Image (cartoon, rainbow, N blue to C red):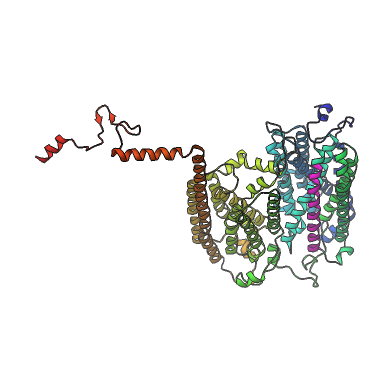
Amino acid sequence: MTARTLDQPTGGTAAPRNRPRVRGTTGWYLLFVLCAGALAGALSLAFNMESRTTLGIPDPGIITTVGFPLAKAGGEMLAALAVGSFMLAAFGTKWRKDRTLDVDGYAASRTGMWALLGWGLIGLLQIPLVLSDVSGQPLSVTIRPENWSVALDQVSEALAWLWVGIFALVGALGASLTRKWIWQPVFFALSLVSMMPLAVVSHNATGGNHDYGTNSYIWHLTFTVFWIGGLMALIGHARRRGRHLDVVVARYSFVALVAFVAMSVSGVVNAWINLGWDDLFTSTYGILVMLKAVAVVLLGLFGYLHRRLTIPAIAKDPYGGAFRRVAIVEVVVMALTIGVAVALGRTPPPPQYAEQAGGTLDLPEITQMEVKLGYQLDIPFGWEAMFTTFRFDLFFGSAAIIAAWIYLYWVRLLKKRGGEWPVVNTVWWLSGCALLLFTSCSALGVYMPALFSTHMLAHMLYSMGIPVMLCLGGPMTLGLRALRPAGRTGVPGLREWLVVFINNPVSRFLTNPLVAAVQFVAGFYLLYFTPLYPYLADEHAGHLFMNIHFLISGYIFYWVIIGVDAAPQRIPESIKLVTLMGTLIFHAFFGISLIMLNSVLAVDYYSALDLPWQVDLLEDQGIGGAIAWALGEVPLFIVMGALFVQWRNSDAREAKRYDRKAERDHDAELNAYNAMLAEMGETGGPRADDPYFTGEVGGEHEMHFDNPVSSETVRRLNR
């Protein structure tokens, strides 16, 4: 593809006559990667010996000391570039009529593929580097094939890096095989997921308050790569003279603003978990936190300059140098921030417990419950706990508030355009968000990881109560009505993405009643009657995964069954009812199976919690089974009511349709029927020549409209 072809405007932003030729961005990307890696390696070299002395780990040599943080920081820049590139390809370019990527989308997708490939290879390389870092052995020893299994078996971070490599390489392979636009959001999601294993092995994921630490770090990491990766992708888009630059930069500006807020809040939460005020200026960890905070504030100023200066400049001169100059400097600062963050992750925070400080008596001792849960429980679960216990869940609590805000914003947009939206739908959606907030943050969410019975009660709400309410809110229909279409010449926006999400083969497959029912029911049996549950229950990330699965699985099922929202296909009410009744049988059997189970699920995990009150684990598990058996019937009444309302509305719509037809043809059908009845009344019955009747069924079988028994037969019977 030549530069001239790329420069040809095809709608959207007007193109000036004399604009510079298309330029590559590979060199700048390598510079950003090296900036992040070099600073991370330098800081690690400066502070590494202090950390190793604290932890009692020998020096593995300069290759590991510098190479491990250098590769990690550079790899995270590549991961951010992959996320930003696929985000641009999926949500910032137009697709062709055959739904393949256009030139801009293809270039962004190729960039994401190569970045994801580099990130995956770095993930595999980090496995021996991690073993070298934690053991003090040189890389020449740990890189031997026989030591890889040792790293994966004994070092949790090495296993996390293996999953990073798997996710990244699978995404890179998929991106190399297709040019379809529909796959770009999938690769975008895979790029983001490839970073999540690192969130569950950071120092924030262990010790006290690790639930806050892990959840806040997930938000922090997610919006960091949105911010950095999105800007790097935009620099490449601007240098290759991509179309609709003003629209894409304006959209990114909103993403950057949200990312700045999310990064700032999550960063404060992480600092609050690991530091006291005295440690902020007296410890190496605190100094690095302050350096990172200064960098984030500086990045916020860059964002302000973009909104006030570069975005208006782009509207006047899309291919001028204002945006590129500011953006490149901003990404360099971002790369340095990543370097500081990687060095921060390798620096142990000041000890908060006696065990971390080698037994210092001035610090409290950490309990097994705090190691497993991240917090302490003092009283049994009950009414007192329900009224006195509250712990805000940074993941699901934040998600509930954000979902409620987006829904109300869409309602406001629709009403500003003169549209109407049923109040009852809004009430259902807000009730679902409120129930999600209550389930995750009240005593239900706090005690859920500690007691199987409470876990099952929350499970029923996550998979049945909350999804039913959310589905009755009809969010997709609201979005389709509230959001403005992009038009033929515009860049596809949220409304177009929503349409594609609803109308695609994957959605049609998942919303097949049989598939929806199987995935909903099978999850119960696969989770609790396989070794999966003990594995997931022992990790905070495992509890996150289970709750996310409950929500998504339940939403897909009730999206099909309730059917009030826009969906890929319309299912008859009779099939919905049969599907619902069929799943209830399997769900009831699941509850009974738990009640009758003679062994305790995840017995090692629950026994290690060391709760301050006596718990009969088998009895508590039986209570959980009874809860699953009993509460499975509750959604039936809500869904049955929804189906009844749908039938009633369907009849009402049919009656209105008939009335409109009667007005058009002046009741022709009714008049014909009345005429037939009048004629039947006059003749005493149907005539033989009536077109609706026949006097002959077959050649040898006559049909008589009078007495079916002949007079000769009557005389013979009377003899």
**How far from the left and from the top, in percent, is residue 557?**
56, 49
Residue 207 in the image, given as x and y percentages of width and height: 74, 62
In the figure, is residue 574 to the left or right of 709?
A: right
Q: Quadrant of the C terminus?
A: top left
156 shown above or below 690 = below
Is most of the magenta stretch helix, strand or loop?
helix
Q: Is residue 437 left or right of residue 345?
A: left
In the rendered image, is residue 59 in sight?
no
- Picture coordinates of residue 506 (x, y %)? 61, 40
Q: Nearer the viewer, residue 22 or 77?
A: 22
In the rendered image, the quadrant that contains the N terminus is: top right
Q: Is residue 713 left or right of residue 226?
A: left
Region of the chain picked out in magenta, as a range: 248-274
Q: Quadrant of residue 21?
A: top right
Q: Nearer the viewer, residue 353 or 24?
A: 24
Residue at 30% of width from left, 34% of height from top?
Answer: 687
Which residue does the image show at 61% across and 42% down from the upper left? 507
Q: Is residue 693 left or right of residue 377?
A: left
Q: Is residue 165 magenta?
A: no
Q: Is residue 251 magenta?
A: yes
| Residue depicted at 70% across the width and 61% down the height | 393
Residue for point 81% across, 72% down: 362
Where is residue 258? Give x, y as percent.
78, 52
Residue 712 in sight in this render: yes
Judged from this view, the residue extending furthest toward the left is 719
Instruction: Count numbered badges in the picture.
Output: 0
Q: Nearer the viewer, residue 51 or 627?
A: 627
